[in-house]
Amino acid sequence: MKRKLSVVLAALLAVSALTVGCGDKKDSGADGLTEVTMAFCTFTGYAPMFIAQEQGYFEEAGIKMNIQVIEDESTYASLITKGDVQFLATAQDPNIKMFANGAKSKYVLTMDQSFGADALVAVSDIQSLDDLAGRSVALDKSASSYYFFLKALEGSSSLSEDDIDVKDMNDTTEAGVAFIGGQVDAAIMWEPELSNALDEVDGAHALVTSADYPDTISDSLVVNADFAAKNPDIVTAVEECWYKAVDFYNANPEEAYKNMASGFEEVSAEDIAGDAEGLHFLGKEENEAMLKEGADGNIFDLCKEMASFWMSKGECETDELDDYFTLVKQ
């Protein structure tokens, strides 16, 4: 799932520009800090990592963190497998799919959940999910929005996907544009198309949002498996830096927005604040609660269900995730 703010970076960073190579090696510079590279795309959900950077949490932990903003998500599996980046943040679904298809990655923590940032928007005469029967819905079948859509149908309607004219788009932005242009009756979308649709299309309204199904769209942090095996202290330190950043965000939102915008080009604190309204950042207690096997909302069951879903769609080679959770499963 590629996420967007109101402005998307135009240029892609080349893989050759990455400054840290081998995934099983950590280099300490003259300053005594361990150099580590993390990658993610332009999305507010990952931006608390810039709080950790701006507030000096990484340096305090002995880490010189090099954050690379890489929009081309097709390179992610290769980057994390080769160790060209040690840490990678992206949506839960692609992280699971990458692992299930052979990427050398390990789950570290859940960063955020979409809590209204994604929505199924429909024209005025569609007042319930059951009203979608025979109508056209635009979405990206390779993205988390597809999983969200089918979970919503299962939980809040009597319909199946076969009852609806689903239009598979290249990405979620294209789905939103199709709805705004009057080409479809409904669409799964995110910002800025979500706000634009509600403002510009007469009678447009959200039938269901990710706040109704927050477990379906989330983002996670993974680490290269070889690096994690040889540097467990660094993995723990990065995890703690995230938790400190979330605590800072909760206590100092205005300063946090500025910190979070600092690492992205052409993104303002106001952009961050707007996007953050539809997100929930997970701190230490919430992540620890998700690690309790058998409990409602535990990460193991949630990811198993996602993996099984994507396996049924031919995008996962396996739904066995025990090795994915080696670092956190007791």
Image: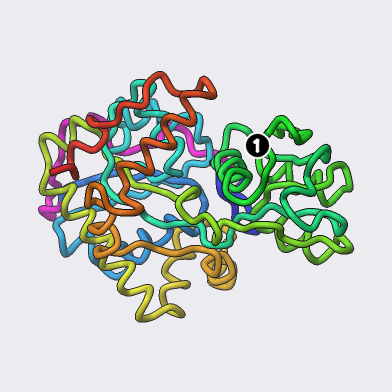
Q: Secondary structure beneath disc 1?
A: loop
Q: Nearer the viewer, residue 113 or 136?
A: 136
Compared across the picture, whether 174 is left or right of 214 comes to: right
In this figure, which residue is indicated by the disc labeled 1?
140
Residue, x 47% and y 72% (percent of image)? 257
| Residue 292 position within the rendered picture, expressed as x and y whole percent measured from the top left | 22, 52
Compared across the picture, whether 111 is left or right of 115 comes to: left
Residue, x 18% and y 36% (percent of image)? 326
User: Relative to 229, does residue 55 appear above or below in the rendering?
Assistant: below
Q: How many marks?
A: 1
**Which residue type does callout 1 highlight?**
Asp
Residue, x 32% and y 47% (percent of image)? 299
Compared across the picture, whether 12 is left or right of 48 comes to: right
Q: Nearer the viewer, residue 179 or 45?
A: 179
Q: Quadrant of the N terminus?
A: top right
Q: Is residue 24 magenta?
A: yes
Q: Which residues are magenta?
A: 11-33
Q: Nearer the viewer, residue 6 or 247?
A: 247
Q: Quadrant of residue 167?
A: top right
Q: Nearer the viewer, residue 250 or 115?
A: 115
| Residue 162 position within the rendered picture, expressed as x and y whole percent measured from the top left | 71, 30
User: Relative to 106, does residue 250 appear above or below in the rendering?
Assistant: below
